[in-house]
Amino acid sequence: MSADDRELDAKIVVRFFGWTWIQAPQFDYNGPLPEQGKCLVSPEMRACIDSGEYQWPRRGIVPPLFFSPPHFSTDPGASKMLREKLAELFTVFVMRTTNGSTTVEVWNEIPQDFAPTKFVDHQIGKGPTEELAVRNCALKLGANHE
């Protein structure tokens, strides 16, 4: 998996699953670290870090994706988790495969008494696999809501 794919996975967990970027340790027991950056953490891990319950690893730099987000473009389990999240957030979730390509379409319906043919937050994601189509749809949704 490429670094670009991991960056896209990071965008998804921030947008849909509540992960946050925090400052990684600036010192270890030998003193200041040569590089100091941010680290992506899940909501559960953030609570452990904030409470002091989690102890950062000794020696060395904590990489940005030390707490690895799911691999949405290659892991069917992670893709299923993302599909479930999109289905929870949108009133309509449609996935169909034709000619070796998968299309995912999501939207929220406006109440029928308001405008029966109008849709809001409509987005389509396509890809050669279900995992990539779901990820692409989520990334487009994230881009529209940042």
Image (cartoon, rainbow, N blue to C red):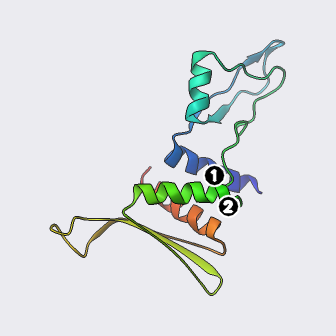
Whether residue 144 is visible = no
Left-right relation of 121 to 95 = left
Residue 98: image x %, image y %? 59, 85
Q: Is residue 72 or residue 4 the one in the foreground?
A: 72
Identity of the residue drawn at 81% across and 12% down: 29
Q: Is residue 82 visible?
A: yes
Helix, strand or loop under label 2 = helix
Residue where numbered disc 1 is placed:
9
Residue at image point 68% right, 30% down: 37
Q: Quadrant of residue 68?
A: top right
Q: Label 2: how many residues lie within 10 Å, few (<14), some (14-19) or many (20+)?
A: few
Residue at x 64%, y 65% (from the top left corner): 131
22 is higher (above) or lower (below) than 109: above
Residue type at tag 1: Asp
Residue 53 rendering spot, x and y as whole percentages = 64, 17
The answer to which quarter of the image holds residue 78 is: bottom right
Q: Secondary structure at mark 1?
A: helix
Q: What is the spatial separation of the Cα atoms under label 1 and label 2, in whole angstroms?
A: 14 Å
Q: In the figure, 94 relative to 83: above or below?
A: below
Q: Is residue 28 left or right of residue 69?
A: right
- Residue 88 in percent (x, y) is at 43, 55
**Residue 81: which disc?**
none
Residue 80's quadrant in the figure? bottom right
Viewer-nearest residue: 88 or 59? 88
Sequence-first disc among 1 and 2: 1
Residue behind mark 2: 76
Residue at left offset 38%, top offset 66% = 107
